[in-house]
Image: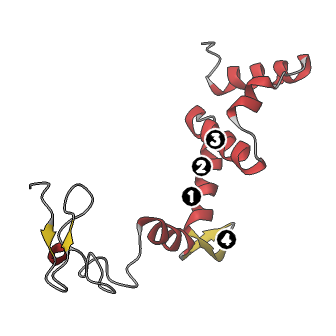
Amino acid sequence: MSDRPHKTPRDGAREEVGYGKPPLHSRFKLGQSGNPRGRPKGTKNLKTDLAEELAERVQVTENGRLLKISKQRLMLKALTTKAIKGDANAAKIVLNLIAQTIGLSQQDEAKTVLGEEDEAILSDWLAHASGGRRE
């Protein structure tokens, strides 16, 4: 495209055409969308779909009783049960969720110093969870 002025079709005046200044005939019309066939109104995004899917209630039997709980709650119950049974990955996920929920950042975690009693409890639990093996 040249840097020559371009004659406008409306009033015969000359208009500059160049970078960031397209000819009038190729500009978007006022009130017209630049993407007329874009995403239809009411189409949901991934975040909305995920939230709705996790909020959906399912029927489960717990301690002999039928309950209707959300899928999110069911996932948390399963994850917590795995963590309690000694699954280190599940325990890490649950602890990270707890930290996020109460607002701890990783910087806060690094600054946290455990007392001797807490360290002893943690090392006993880690030894138990790993089947007596120390890593």
Instruction: Name the secondary structure under disc 4.
Output: loop
- Whether residues under marks 1 and 4 lie with C-beta atoms below 8 angstroms apart, the answer is no
Residue 10 location, quadrant: bottom left
| Residue at which label 3 appears | 83
Which quarter of the rendering shows the N terminus? bottom left
For the C terminus, the quadrant is top right
Whichever of labels 3 and 1 marks the residue nearer the N terminus, that label is 1
Name above or below for residue 24 compared with residue 22.
below
Q: Quadrant of residue 6?
A: bottom left
In percent of the image, x 66 and y 41: which residue is there? 96
Q: Nearer the viewer, mark 1 or mark 4?
A: 1
How crowded pointer 3 is (Cα within 10 Å; few <14, some 14-19, many 20+) is rated as some
Q: Which residue is mark 4?
A: 64
Q: Secondary structure at mark 3?
A: helix
Please tell me how crowded label 4 is: few (under 14), some (14-19), or many (20+) other residues with Cα within 10 Å: few
- For the residues bearing labels 1 and 2, Cβ distance under 8 angstroms: yes
- The residue sitting at 58% across, 64% down in the picture is 72
Cβ atoms at labels 2 and 3 below 8 Å apart: yes
As measured in the structure, the alpha-carbon distance from the residue carrying label 3 to the one carrying label 1 is 12 Å
Q: Is residue 65 above or below residue 74?
A: below
Specify the amino acid type for callout 3: Ala
